[in-house]
Image (tube, rainbow, N blue to C red):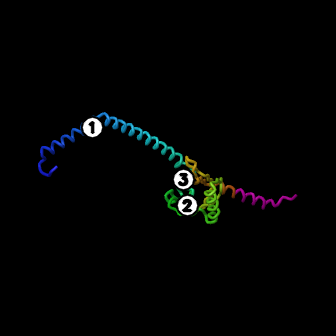
Amino acid sequence: MSSKNPTYQELKAKLAEAEEITSALRNEEVDAVIGKNRLLLLRLKEVEETLRESEEQFRAIADYTYDWESWLSSDGHLMWINPAVENLTGYSAKECREMPDYPLPILLEDYREEFAKRLQEALKEQTSINDYEFSISHKNGAVRWMSISWQPIYSEKDQYIGQRTSIRDITDRKQAEEKLRESSNSRFLLKGPISV
């Protein structure tokens, strides 16, 4: 169309184009496509709702466990960690995700080498461990005893995707064991060795 007033021919062409569009909109094929799209949109909303509910269930289980839970990828990188880590270590989940060589910096120096060796073996060989004990330095400086268990995890297609770790604070138990040991030693010192 020109920039000046439209000619009769130009107006006639525009009118014909508008009639074609109107006719197509009234066409049953368009109605069928729109109907299918509505069904697809409804199905998409159902899938989104199911996904949201599934995510809520995952969070309820994962984020509200008492123990420090994490997922390490098959090459040892932290993929996920639950908020309980902060209660046990003083470090937030965000701080742990940003930590190089997680979780080694949290461990006391005496435990790092053996822990790293065992973890690397488990990652490489896809093996489990149960109740391996070690000490950490809490962010506030306190020494805490922990017990870790880990096991390999696999995708739905049975592909190895890393290790799931579960760590629990056993400080109270270790302190009770130490008191019992001290008590047994002091009784032995007071009574002396048993003669046969």
Confirm or deny contact between disc 1 and disc 2 (CB under 8 A). Answer: no
In the rendered view, does 186 fall on the left or right side of 26?
A: right
Let me know if residue 191 is in the magenta part: yes
In the rendered view, does 55 fall on the left or right side of 177?
A: left
| N-terminal label among 1 and 2 | 1
| Residue 84's disc number | 3
Per the rendered image, the range of residues in magenta is 179-196
Q: Amino acid at mark 1?
A: Ala
Would you place residue 48 above or below residue 105 in this image? Answer: above
Q: For the residue labelled by badge 1, is the local secondary structure a helix, a strand or a loop? A: helix
| Residue 102's disc number | 2
Would you place residue 27 above or below residue 9 in this image? Answer: above
| N-terminal label among 3 and 1 | 1
Please name the residue that numbered disc 1 is placed on: 24
Q: Residues within 10 Å of mark 3 (few under 14, many from 20)?
A: many
The outermost residue toward the bottom is 109
Residue at 61% x, 54% y: name it: 169
